[in-house]
Structure formats: structure tokens, C-alpha cells
Amino acid sequence: MGRILVTGTAGFIGFHLSQKLLKLGNEVIGIDSLNEYYDVNLKHDRLRQLKDDSNFQFYHLDISDRTALPELFVKHSFTRVVHLAAQAGVRYSLTNPHAYVDSNLVGFLNILEACRHAKIEHLVFASSSSVYGANTKRPFSVQDPVNHPISLYAATKRSNELMAHSYSHLYGMAVTGLRFFSVYGPWGRPDMALFLFTKAILEGKPIDVFNGGKMQRNFTYIDDVVEGVSRLMDKIPTPAPNALQDLSDPSTSYAPFKIYNIGNHQTVQLGYFIEVLENYLGKKATQNLLPLQPGDVPQADADITDLKREIGFQPDTPIEVGIPKFVDWYRSYNRW
């Protein structure tokens, strides 16, 4: 694939994807703002792993910088762009809304503009399962409308999809959006459930369990996610036949635009997720049962029919395998 730009390369998914692309023999240019949403030391430690490869270059750069970002595209001739940089977190968006506008809207517009002027062959960007919002039809399908986001984070991610489609329509840009479902694994984010639970249980502290532990998720192991992303990078979308006459499928278009779900098809209740973690740690959790939080959905499960059909792959790592791999990494990284 050649020279690839990965934004958010010091982040959880960006780090793992960069590792995967380097192993496949690509040259990877990574950018990240290294913001302080969570422990910056973890981000630096991820980068140290990547910098051991001579085919990796890193730039400390914020995608909201309208001057520096275009200059990077001029300096390097990218064949693909994978845009993963974003302000993450549903609950954080309730108290820090402007961070989401700056990164997820302004920053994404800058990415679109840079890709347009550089005539990038394929832009792949991270959306989120949160765009399904108040949808009640299960499983969540890319063919379903997503008109009722219930958090600002979700609204910005849905906005990204709409912005990307407009650029695909106006300029013929090939763009693919990916709706990730509850990604977890080694080097994961400290604000996510598995990291928080593992840390608290080992330290003998209670864990906050929302919706009484009855939340249901497609917990998707990181290796499955990067495998799907790396395969889709070469699956450049083309206009769908007859799409202009039938606009009922929002996942595709008369423009070179496509949306996919990337999620494990096995739906797991949060209570069982905690049980598997407790069993591997050999220690029970003290659970602080709380109601469903604003912006959260009680159930999120992915219809991955399109993903399987297009690339012949589906995420399927069970939590009984993925959780121990995370715990082993956590113990090693934190010297437990």
C-alpha cells in the first residue's frame, strides 16, 4: 500500500493499526496531538514501541491546525489515510462539549480538505456505534437510519459521516466510514470499562456498574478491529448501481462512499463480562450498582453482514480469550 497516514497514532486503535501496517511492510506516518484526556505517559509508551521501526515517522500535530496539516500532506505523498484521531468518550462530552467541536468537527473538516487537495486514493475514518443512539431495532444495521443520537459525541460522529458523504459526492473522493463497537485489548484506554475494572479490582476498590450490570455489548478485541480496518483499506468503494434512484440504504451511495460496522457478533451482558474478569484475576469485585447514565444505550450489537460479504472476515475473538490477554498486558505494564 505504500506510505500511509494514520491520525491518532498514539491512541489505542491507532497504535495497534500502525503496528499492523508496519508489519505488512508499509511506511507509516503518524500524527497525534497527545492531549491530556487520559495519561499522556501511556501514549508516549505506545509511540516508543512504534519508533523502533525505521518505517515509522511521528509528528506531534493537532488536526485542528489548519496550517500544519496541509503542509504535512504536501511534504509526504500518501496513498491512504486512516483517520482515527478524535475526542473520545460519551460521558466526557457532557461536560467538555467544545473539545468535540474542535477535534471531531473542525479537525475532520481539515482532514477532508487535505485529502481533497492531495487527491488521496482512499480515506478511511472512524465513526462509532454510538451513532445508532435511540434506535430500538436490533441488531444495529448500517442499512438503518441513524437520526437520533443521544450524546454530543455521537452527534459529532454522525456529522462526520454526513460531511464525508458530501465530499465524496462533490469531489469523487473514495471514503469509508467504520462504526466500531466496544473495542478492548492490550494498551487500551484507561477510561474504558475493562481498564477501570481491572485496576479497581486489583487495588481492592469498588467498581461502578451502570444499568445494574444489564448493559449488553459486542465487545470487540483489538486484533479483530485492526484486521478489519487493514483489509478495508484496499476495499475502495465505488458508486452503487441504481443508488441514485433508491436512497433507502444509507450505508452506500451513488458516490464512492461506504459505511461498515466492525463489531464482534457475540452479544455479552456486562455482568458476565465482569464475571470472566473476576475469574481470571482470581478476585471478586465490589460492585457499585448505578442506573443507566445519560448518553449511554442499554444494548449495542452489530449486524456485520456487509463486512463479511465484502472482505470475508468477521471479528470473533471471545471475551474468554480477549480479557486474559488484556489482564496479562496490564499486569506486565503496571508491574503487578
Image: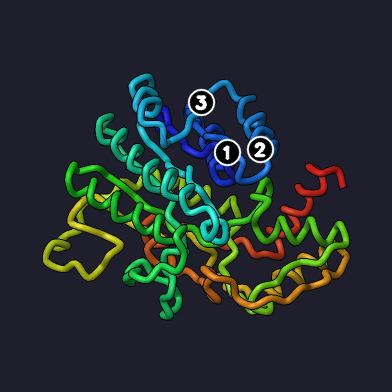
Mark 1 vs 3, N-terminal side: 1
Q: Which mark is residue 59?
A: 3
Quadrant occupied by the N terminus: top left
- Residue 40 numbered mark, or none: 2
Where in the figure is residue 72, as x and y percent of width and height?
A: 39, 24
Crowd tier of the residue under label 2, counting other residues whose Cα lies within 10 Å: few below 14, some 14–19, many 20 or above: some
In front: 163, or 80? 163
Judge by depth and name the residue closer to the eye, 249 or 223. Answer: 249
* Colour mode of the rendering: rainbow
Identify residue type, mark 2: Val
The answer to which quarter of the image holds residue 319 is bottom right
Identify which residue is drawn at 31% across, 40% down. Answer: 112
What percent of the width, then of the height, locates residue 208?
72, 68
Q: Which residue is drawn at 64% across and 78% down?
A: 291
Which of the two labelled residues, at mark 2 and mark 3, occupies the earlier sequence position? 2
User: In the image, what residue type sits under mark 1?
Assistant: Asn
Residues at badges 2 and 1 in contact (C-beta under 8 Å)?
Answer: yes
Q: How far apart are marks 1 and 3 (CA)?
A: 14 Å
- Determine which residue is flagged by label 1: 35
> Would you say 166 lies left or right of 144 here?
left
- Does residue 321 sit above or below 234 in this rendering? below
Q: Is residue 146 left or right of residue 172?
A: right
Q: Which of marks 2 and 1 is nearer the N terminus?
A: 1
